[in-house]
Amino acid sequence: MTDKYTAVWVSHSSMGDFLKCPRLYYLHNMYKDKKTGHKITIVNPHMSLGVAVHEVLEALADYPANERMKRDLLLDFEEAWKKVSGKKGGFTSDEEEHEFKQRGIVMLENVRQDPKFLVNKRIKLPRETMNPNFFLSEDHNIILNGLVDWIEYLPDDTLHIIDFKTGKKEEQETSLQLPIYLLLCNALQKRKVSRASYWYLESGNVVEKELPDADTAYRDVMEVAMKVKEARRIAKREGEDKVFVCPRGAYDSNTKEGGCFNCIPYEKILAGDESVEFVGIGGFNQDMYIVKKML
Ligand code: SF4
């Protein structure tokens, strides 16, 4: 039976965590602080840069095509940056913040000089307060949600999915990002998606990717979503500490050994370690932390 409140919600981020390891999925997507009742998250400069740049570019979709580039993108960026400035954005020094902010300015300057798809017609997927979402499987009560950065409407009545990249790393070929975007577009509107591209904003490069066919996309996403659902089901029965375990060598808060780059900050929060610091409550009501010392 479908029920949005009891459904398992999956996204590119949560399934990405699960694929790295089930314990990371648990720490980032399920664990709730006993005192605050909030989930926990680590803020870092890379994430904050991405959030601020995306906010500026995605907001352009609300303006008519011919007015978008009349906006002062750098002024909009100043406003967006206020929300991530300082510790709440994961910055541990003024120099570090300046360096990342400059990178954002370069990206938006690139966009101003060559706005590419941003001056063309676009569509938006329907949404209410949550990200666009749909029942990936009604039988299994699984909802897929995600936000496609930009959807260009092409003259042949098809769509072009564009993902803004603020990092330098190329998206892996095995990434579920495009399959997820394709499924969201197919489920939430009627036009065919004919193209998909990653737009690396710092270099200005656009890399067009081959789209998976819808059946393959569904199969690949569903396979991971079912693993997530199954792990949660067993954890409910047997306990989270039995299912969401480290497959390598778990972090030990007493010896400070074990763990890996992905999970150590979260484990330190759970252990009340002094190297992590609470910096505020995020937009989705998560307790936000920064890592004060190098791992
Ligand atoms: S050390 Fe273990 S628990 Fe931590 S992310 Fe790596 S595999 Fe997962």
Image (cartoon, rainbow, N blue to C red):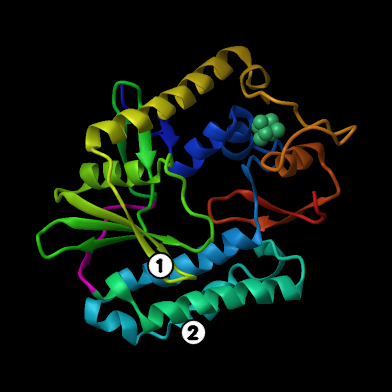
For disc 2, the neighbor class at 10 Å (few under 14, some 14 to 19, many from 20) is few
Asked whether 33 or 185 is in front, the reply is 185
- x then y, percent, for residue 55: 45, 67
Q: Can residue 142 be seen by looking at this rendering?
A: no
Q: Position of residue 68 (x, y in %)?
A: 31, 79
Picture quadrant of residue 20 = top right
Tag 1: amino acid: Asn
Query: Where 45 falls versus 113 (above or below)?
Result: above
Query: Residue at coordinates 40% horizontally, 70% vertically from top-left?
Result: 57
Q: Which residue is mark 1?
A: 205
Q: Which mark is residue 75?
A: 2
Residue at the left extreme, as displayed: 156
Instruction: Answer whether residue 34 is visible to the viewer in this image.
Output: yes
Residue mark closest to the camera, 1 vs 2: 1
Image quarter hosting the N terminus:
top left
- On screen, residue 50 above or below 273: below
Please report the bounds of the magenta region as a residue range: 120-129
Residue 81 rendering spot, x and y as whole percentages: 57, 73
Regarding mark 2 in the picture, which secondary structure is present there? helix
Q: Is residue 254 magenta?
A: no
Q: Is the C-beta separation of discs 1 and 2 under 8 Å?
A: no
Magenta stretch secondary structure, dominant: loop
Q: How far apart, in angstroms, are the residues tagged by discs 1 and 2?
A: 24 Å
Q: Residue at x 70, y 35 (%)?
A: 34
Q: Name the residue at 65% across, 58% down.
A: 44
Q: Earlier in the sequence, mark 1 or mark 2?
A: 2
**In the image: residue 124, left or right of residue 264:** left
Residue 80: give its label.
Answer: none
